[in-house]
Amino acid sequence: MDFRTSGLSDLPTKTMRFNEYRILWILVLFDLPTETKKDRKLYAKFRKEIMADGFTMFQFSIYLRHCSSRENTDVHIKRVKKLLPPKGHVGILTVTDKQFGMMELFYGKEQKELPDTPQQLELF
């Protein structure tokens, strides 16, 4: 079998391109009230629970999580929706790994590297 004529010669390129759009990042952006003791407790509870679900802080009130598939993304979005506090604003944004990789980060005028993508095992 000749890989050049079978279409398999560009398989790694197709797989890489496919994964860049299949792998997703979830960003949870929130602005919750912290005026009362009860508000602060609800804020802390929401933050701790999304972190327990694998989200990490990107900036204050912006948390992100890497997901290997759309199905995995849907599971974590449902979990966040179940954790929503009674007051405040919460946004859930999903972007592809390709889109996330095109982000530029700066601390002041100094450019920083993006967070590493977690290594995923693929079983065939």
Image (tube, helix red, strand yellow):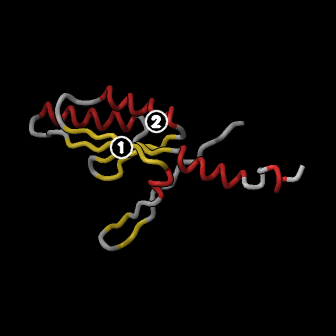
Q: Residue at x 90, y 49 (%)?
A: 1
Q: Is residue 62 left or right of residue 36?
A: right
Q: Is residue 108 above or below residue 43?
A: below
Q: Who's the residue at 35% across and 51% down the image?
A: 58
> In the rendering, which numbered label is found on residue 93?
1
- CA neighbours of label 2 inside 10 A, class few (<14), some (14 to 19), many (20+): some
- Decide which of tag 1 and tag 2 comes sooner along the chain: 2
Question: Image point 27% across, 30% down: which residue?
Answer: 84
Q: Is residue 28 above or below residue 8?
A: above
Q: Evaluate if marks 1 and 2 touch, with contact meaning CB atoms under 8 Å apart.
A: no
Q: Is residue 118 left or right of residue 108?
A: right
Residue placed furthest toward the bottom: 109
Tell me where residue 57 appears, x and y as whole percent.
35, 48
Residue density around tag 1, few if under 14, some if 14–19, many if 20 or more, within 10 Å? few
Q: Which residue extends farthest right? A: 1
Which amino acid lies under the numbered mark 1 shown in the image of this protein? Leu
- At mark 1, the secondary structure is strand
Report the residue marked by disc 2: 73
- Quarter of the image for residue 105 reads bottom left
Locate residue 1 relative to residue 108 in the image: left or right.
right
Q: 15 or 47, which lies in front?
A: 15
State the CA–CA distance, disc 1 to disc 2: 11 Å
**Residue at coordinates 32% horizontally, 36% vertically from top-left?**
48
Residue 93 position, x and y percent, is: 36, 43
Q: Which residue is at the front of the view, 78 or 65? A: 78
Of the pair 7 and 78, the residue shown nearer to us: 7
Residue type at numbered disc 2: Thr
